[in-house]
Image (cartoon, rainbow, N blue to C red):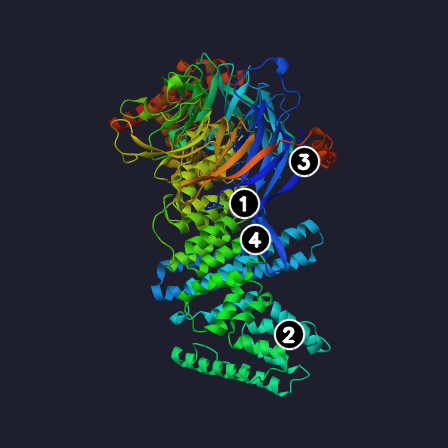
């Protein structure tokens, strides 16, 4: 399958300052952004893009009911598989840890979630052009409403998958045998009593299993729109440990930052504002099996820079930079300094003012250099 | 970037598509400094077919700061060595020796920086592509600035002159970074008529302001009037100018006295109008006298306020202490205030350094110089930290400033496809977060080749990261399994010691044996050693192979015993029982009886059990196999008969 990737343009983003040195010339410093455009070949809008642990494979899902898997070869993305996954829009796609092989989970408007595994293909025989086969290992059909998010548990918990749906129920499935992914058992389910839009596992190995869920229910009467659940070893069930009362607007995304040995947990919430919370466990991590954890919750940042709704949040590997996207059409990058104060460090946005004609003119040279189908760049 | 104090300094980057009301940008992190953006409709709503967007969705792969480490590869690699050696010394050396090592390291860093900068200059000179050239020049600029700041910090914080007399070092600093005067002088000397050269006097002034009296005298000697009294007088005072050096056993007071005498002589000669014939010579002597007004006139020869500051100190207060520098900043800046209204970042950093506000230096350098690389701030902060100049207290993020900066630098290295090993070495020296960072990264480094996987495995084992090591082996094993390379898969899984996955592979081996009658990875199975104890299935495989060896070597007794114990232990998967029974067949048909009665019963028992619960398997057997089973039954019965006979005969003999 061909993917024409064109280096559209390079922009030197103008940085802050010009500098007067040695009386001779002015010089400017730039942060260099380079953008590459990848034609997704999806026939409808994309809902989610997800990377595997090594960043060399990418999965995309779309309203066109399909999922596509892309492989990075020699710096270019090639679509190596594309298949119909659901009978409705596919909201999210996510990779399992590679310890378990090449495994994907998807969730959809069609009220199901599914687990997919890549079949052993003829690797090496045809090179990158071979189209790989993904087969459905299981369909998780317990939900009666649209399944809005799926997430694999951190690896140390084994092969577990959490789903959340509009009816407010979080379900946690576990693979009975990690070598045979067709057998999943519903281990736990709990009702959060509001329409759920997103969930996130805490990846900390030191803490008992923990999930944050968010609701996009519009009514503010429903109270805090983010809840935090924790698995209690003694009671053998998931318990609600916190409600974030400060967030009453609809929540569209929640993400725990990778823990990285911090003494607290970091949670990013996409609501009408971007909210960054720190959760400090009031008891020692690990030990003490009795009773749920209690947290000292502090709001380290609340930003209305998007000037409207924030839709998505995404952490980098070390949980030091957060990317948020919002209704203003821009993606903002946030970073904390050593005093732990969060600031916006960059804005990436779509062009607002360019007319169609200008845009065409701007893109024309690169369009001309787009390779014709059938050739690789 | 991180420690920005000034608000509103936000990068803005525009992507080449139009904003639309229904479609909004979303983003996902890739590896390192890479974001993937795509347009998406929000919120989640299933739409009518007719509403489908006509154009297909695009994904944008946005990367930044990707190239710095390619250009400065040498800088990264060579300073990496200096850094690692220094950290070792920090642990092992006593305080006083350590300080001299720190000074040495600081100079080494600067030397590498200088070398890289010169190399870049060469590349830039030979570069024909204009845009590339521009880029190189930007880097050179940055390198030059970093050197300027670093060497000033070295003078003020790292290699502090005894007694706090900084002027000599500051003069070196000037001469090192402001070479205009020297270059000009060379140009003048090599012209046909040096003293007629339009920049003859400028060259002299510039050299004078840097305290380079030797060369000033050389240039003056080239003047056509050099034999006039005025010139001789000027030469005399220049020659007599006292110099401060710590090498000569000279006390500060002694030097101060000498200097005062010399200056009085200058003033005296000047007032006696010894130089009045030549206004240029008068300017020179005015400088020597430390005349305030003349420095203002010569400000263009100083270029910057910090040059002027050092020049003025040289002729006005040569024994100034490090602490006195602060008071001189404002007046010198005031001289230049008209020509450049805004105070620049570099100026700010140098000013902060001269004011001993080290945190401000680092803060501003972060903001100003770390966009491309955290190299500068992280290495400087490391040295300053070990010198005891940085506050070692824990900051709100969880560790000290040194670690914060090292983490940033290491992170940028980890994002690079081939510098991860360097990055890990830096993380090793981050006491609080380093280990967690390494843990997070090693699991994410793409394992394209076996070699790379072994390398990363080694990194994990060296650091006792067992969970990650196991994960790498498992990932590699799964990859091999998917490619049906069972031998490699097994050897990776053996390293990960994971019983479930190993069983998966051994079953494949046994299957293969059932189908093809031979093992494909004999060497591996033969050399399992103690690792065969990891799981039963592996033990079985190894023992079964041992049975083959016995059999092939003609050790019938050993073979029989082993086979029987394998069968009776029930270690083998059911599908393999048939094969084992078949293995017994040739042994049963040997002329001598090798299975005694109870052993034969054991075999029969196994056959019965197989037939009883494995009927489904049994039905699928081919005709030849059913035939074989029949043969087996016959052989077993015959053996039983023979064995009974034999055992009874033995007993008969013993009775008789």
The quarter of the displayed image where residue B59 is located: top right
Left or right, B222 with respect to B243, comes to right
Residue that badge 1 annotates: B416
Indicate the chain on which mark 3 is placed.
Answer: A
Q: Are marks 3 and 2 on the same chain?
A: no
Q: On what subunit does the disc labeled 1 rest?
A: B
The residue shown at (54%, 70%) is: B293
**Residue matched to label 4:** B73
| Dots 4 and 3 on the same chain | no
SS label for mark 2: helix
Alpha carbon of mark 4 to alpha carbon of mark 1: how far? 11 Å
**Which of labels 1 and 3 is toward the front?**
3
Residue indicated by mark 3: A6
Q: CA distance from mark 2 to mark 1?
A: 51 Å
**Chain designation of label 2:** B
Quarter of the N terminus of chain A within the rendering: top right
User: Is B35 located above or below residue B290 in the figure?
Assistant: above
In this rendering, position of residue A72 left or right of residue B381: right
């Amino acid at each position: 399958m061909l993917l024409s990737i064109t280096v559209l343009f390079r922009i030197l983003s103008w940085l802050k300052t010009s500098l007067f040195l040695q009386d001779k010339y002015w010089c400017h410093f730039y942060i260099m952004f380079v953008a590459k455009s990848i034609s997704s070949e999806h026939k409808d809008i994309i809902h989610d893009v997800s990377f595997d642990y090594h960043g060399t494979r990418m999965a995309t899902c779309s309203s066109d009911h399909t999922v596509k898997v892309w492989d990075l070869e020699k710096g270019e993305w090639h679509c190596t598989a594309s298949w119909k996954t659901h009978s409705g829009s596919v909201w999210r796609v996510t990779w399992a840890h590679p310890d378990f092989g090449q495994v994907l989970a998807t969730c959809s408007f069609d009220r199901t979630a599914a687990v997919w595994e890549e079949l052993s293909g003829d690797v090496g025989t045809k090179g990158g052009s071979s189209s790989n086969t993904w087969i459905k290992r299981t369909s998780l059909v317990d939900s009666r409403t649209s399944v809005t998010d799926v997430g694999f548990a951190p690896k140390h918990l084994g092969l577990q998958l959490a789903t959340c749906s509009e009816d407010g129920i979080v379900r946690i499935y576990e693979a009975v045998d990690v070598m045979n992914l067709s057998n999943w058992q519903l281990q736990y389910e709990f009702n959060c009593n509001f329409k759920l839009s997103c969930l996130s596992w805490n990846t900390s190995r030191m803490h008992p299993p923990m999930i944050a869920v968010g609701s996009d229910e519009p009514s503010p009467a429903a109270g805090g729109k983010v809840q935090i659940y924790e698995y209690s070893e003694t009671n053998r069930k998931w318990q609600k440990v916190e409600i974030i009362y400060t967030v009453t607007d609809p929540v569209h995304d929640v993400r725990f930052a990778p823990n990285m040995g911090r003494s607290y947990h970091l949670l990013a919430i996409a609501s009408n504002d971007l909210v960054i919370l720190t959760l400090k466990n009031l008891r020692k991590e690990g030990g003490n099996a009795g009773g749920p954890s209690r947290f000292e919750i502090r709001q380290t940042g609340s930003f209305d820079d998007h000037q409207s709704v924030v839709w998505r949040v995404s952490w980098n590997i070390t949980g030091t930079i957060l990317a948020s996207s919002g209704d203003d059409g821009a993606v903002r990058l946030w970073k904390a300094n050593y005093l732990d104060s969060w600031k916006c460090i960059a804005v990436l946005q779509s062009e607002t003012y360019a007319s169609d004609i200008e845009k065409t003119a701007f893109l024309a040279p690169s369009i001309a250099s787009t390779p014709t189908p059938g050739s690789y760049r | 970037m991180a420690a920005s104090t000034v608000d509103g300094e936000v990068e803005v980057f525009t992507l080449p598509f139009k904003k639309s009301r229904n479609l909004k940008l979303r983003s996902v992190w890739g590896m390192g400094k890479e974001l993937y953006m795509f347009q998406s409709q929000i919120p989640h709503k299933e739409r009518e077919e007719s509403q489908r967007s006509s154009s297909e969705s695009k994904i944008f792969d946005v990367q930044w700061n990707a190239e710095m480490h390619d250009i400065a590869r040498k800088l990264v690699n060579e300073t990496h060595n200096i850094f690692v050696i220094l950290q070792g010394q920090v642990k092992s050396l006593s305080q006083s020796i350590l300080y001299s090592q720190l000074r040495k390291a600081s100079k080494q860093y600067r030397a590498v920086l200088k070398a890289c900068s010169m190399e870049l200059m060469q590349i830039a000179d030979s570069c024909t592509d204009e845009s590339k050239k521009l880029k190189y020049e930007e880097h050179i600029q940055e390198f030059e600035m970093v050197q300027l700041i670093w060497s000033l910090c070295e003078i003020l914080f790292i290699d502090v002159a005894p007694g706090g007399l900084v002027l000599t070092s500051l003069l070196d600093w000037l001469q090192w970074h402001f070479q205009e005067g020297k270059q000009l002088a060379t140009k003048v000397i090599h012209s046909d008529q040096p003293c007629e050269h339009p920049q003859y006097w400028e060259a002299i002034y510039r050299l004078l302001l840097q305290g380079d009296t030797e060369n000033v005298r050389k240039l003056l000697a080239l003047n056509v009037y050099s034999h006039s009294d005025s010139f001789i007088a000027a030469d005399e005072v220049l020659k007599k100018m006292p110099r401060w050096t710590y090498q000569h056993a000279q006390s500060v007071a002694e030097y101060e006295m000498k200097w005062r005498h010399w200056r009085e002589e200058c003033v005296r000669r000047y007032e006696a109008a010894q130089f009045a014939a030549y206004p240029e010579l008068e300017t020179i002597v005015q400088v020597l006298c430390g005349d305030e007004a003349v420095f203002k006139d010569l400000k263009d020869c100083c270029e910057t306020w910090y040059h002027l500051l050092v020049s003025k100190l040289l002729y006005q207060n040569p024994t100034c202490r490090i602490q006195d520098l602060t008071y001189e900043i404002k007046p010198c800046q005031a001289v230049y205030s008209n020509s450049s209204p805004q105070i620049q970042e570099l100026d700010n950093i140098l000013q902060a350094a001269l004011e001993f506000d080290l945190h401000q230096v680092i803060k501003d350098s972060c903001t100003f110089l770390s966009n491309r690389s955290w190299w500068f701030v992280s290495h400087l902060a490391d040295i300053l930290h070990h010198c005891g100049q940085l506050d070692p207290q824990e900051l709100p993020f969880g560790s000290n400033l040194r670690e914060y900066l090292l983490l940033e630098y290491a992170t940028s290295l980890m994002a690079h496809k081939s510098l991860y090993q360097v990055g890990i070495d830096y993380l090793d020296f981050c006491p609080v977060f380093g280990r967690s960072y390494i843990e997070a990264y090693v699991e994410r480094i793409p394992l394209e080749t076996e070699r790379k996987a072994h390398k990363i495995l080694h990194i994990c084992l060296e650091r006792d990261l067992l969970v990650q090591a196991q994960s790498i082996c498992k990932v590699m094993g799964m990859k091999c399994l998917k490619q049906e390379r069972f031998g490699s898969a097994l050897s990776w899984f053996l390293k990960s010691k994971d019983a479930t996955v190993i069983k998966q592979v051994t079953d494949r081996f046994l299957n293969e044996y059932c189908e093809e009658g031979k093992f494909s990875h004999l060497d591996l199975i033969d050399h399992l050693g103690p690792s065969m104890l990891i799981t039963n299935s592996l033990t079985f495989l190894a023992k079964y192979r041992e049975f083959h060896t016995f059999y092939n070597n003609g050790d019938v007794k050993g073979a029989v015993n082993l086979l029987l114990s394998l069968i009776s232990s029930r270690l083998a998967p059911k599908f393999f029982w048939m094969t084992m029974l078949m293995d017994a067949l040739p042994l049963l048909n040997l002329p001598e009886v090798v299975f005694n009665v109870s052993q034969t019963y054991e075999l029969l028992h196994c056959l019965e059990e197989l037939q009883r619960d494995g009927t489904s398997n049994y039905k699928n057997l081919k005709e030849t196999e059913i035939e074989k089973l029949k043969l087996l039954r016959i052989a077993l019965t015959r053996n039983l008969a023979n064995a009974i006979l034999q055992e009874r005969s033995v007993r008969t003999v013993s009775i008789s």
